[in-house]
Amino acid sequence: MNSDSATEHGTGEEPAAVEVRGLVKSYGDRTVVNGLTFRVRAGSVTGFLGPNGAGKSTTLRMILGLDRPTAGEVLIGGRPYGGLVEPLRTVGALLDAGAAHPGRTARDHLLCVAQAGCLPGTRVEEVLAQVGLESAAKRRIGGFSLGMRQRLGIAAALLGDPEVLILDEPVNGLDPEGIRWLRHFLKALAARGRAVLISSHLMTETALLADRLVVIGRGRLLADVSMAEFAAEHGRSRVRVRSDEPERLRASLVREGLRVTSGDDGALEVYEADPAVVGRIAAHEGTPVLELVRVEDSLEEAFMRMTADSVEYGGRPLEEVA
């Protein structure tokens, strides 16, 4: 990969596989991407997260040269997409699993993509095997399930054995085995020095897969950090404690100045406290404790709290609209 980016900035860091600089995209008076800057590094899986309408799909299209930015630029391996000599050998992408012609067979579709990208036809059989579609190679795509179309789209993205892989909602339609396969496959690619950027709404899967997170809201960058940094900065720990005398325990904890809420199952959640402190208070009051454990926020909880002000299409509980 071109190392001009690292030299240019003089940081001595590993050059960015994808570098987004001050990206802006406006449609008339509506700005959907606003001054976005982030880097996707080689050797890691980066999760690209944001609420619906945050500008994720528009950003991916600009990275791949499908939309022209209003301002700013994107470099892939130090060059804009339009300046890549062999683009499919540099970056592979899956944006829409339904884009393949339904009348073609899986093999013919991949042969067409390979020929258009000046890639050897031998790669077709290789990628079919990689994604587990050998037995479906001669079947027409119109009869494929959504999960099979996803695998085919991933196969097309892999044809050039690219340095950068960009996947939009890659686990959509995959069964549990397929999700597990994809998780290990993408981690293995990153371990070999490839850069992987995935856009997804599945927080649990992203937490298992990604090394880094780029979070946007209303077209602006909210976070560009490692998964560990995100958890430390935006996560929130609490103590879960359960007793057969919950009100008595609650009163004791509140008297000590602790903030306490009740869970759906009757357990108490104590914020900004250590389990040992909660246990000592309960013991001093003679309140029996049935459960006492520290609980960390999930990625989904931290993400929802971070993006609460950036949600464009928010629903309401049923009781509020009944």
Image (tube, rainbow, N blue to C red):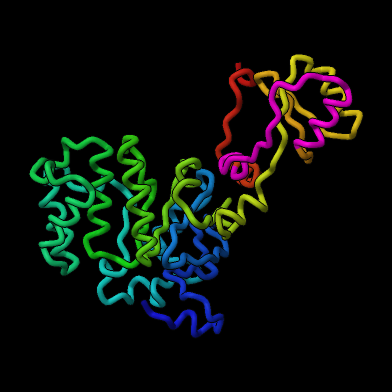
- How far across and down, in percent of the image, does residue 174 sit? 32, 38
Q: Name, please, the residue furthest toward the left.
A: 138
Of residues 110 and 320, the one nearer the viewer is: 110
Task: Determine the residue positioned at 49% across, 61% down.
Answer: 25
Of residues 139 and 255, the one nearer the viewer is: 255
Whether residue 222 can be seen here: no
Task: Determine the residue positioned at 85% across, 20% down.
Answer: 286
Of residues 203 and 260, the one nearer the viewer is: 260
Q: Which residues are magenta?
A: 275-303
- Picture quarter with the N terminus: bottom left
- How far across and down, in percent of the image, does residue 18 sit? 43, 68
Question: Is residue 286 found inside the magenta-colored segment of the image?
Answer: yes
Whether residue 116 can be seen here: yes
- Judged left or right of residue 135, residue 24 is right
Residue 79: quadrant of the picture: bottom left
Task: Determine the residue positioned at 51% across, 59% down.
Answer: 26
- How far across and down, in percent of the image, does residue 34 sit? 56, 61
Is residue 182 depicted above or below 260 in this figure?
below
Picture mark count = 0
Task: Determine the residue positioned at 31% across, 48% down.
Answer: 96
- Picture quarter with the C terminus: top right
- How far across and down, in percent of the image, does residue 215 sit? 55, 53
Of residues 205 and 149, the one nearer the viewer is: 205
Question: Is residue 25 found inside the magenta-colored segment of the image?
Answer: no
Is residue 157 depicted above or below 22 in this figure?
above
Q: Name, please, the residue furthest toward the right.
A: 255
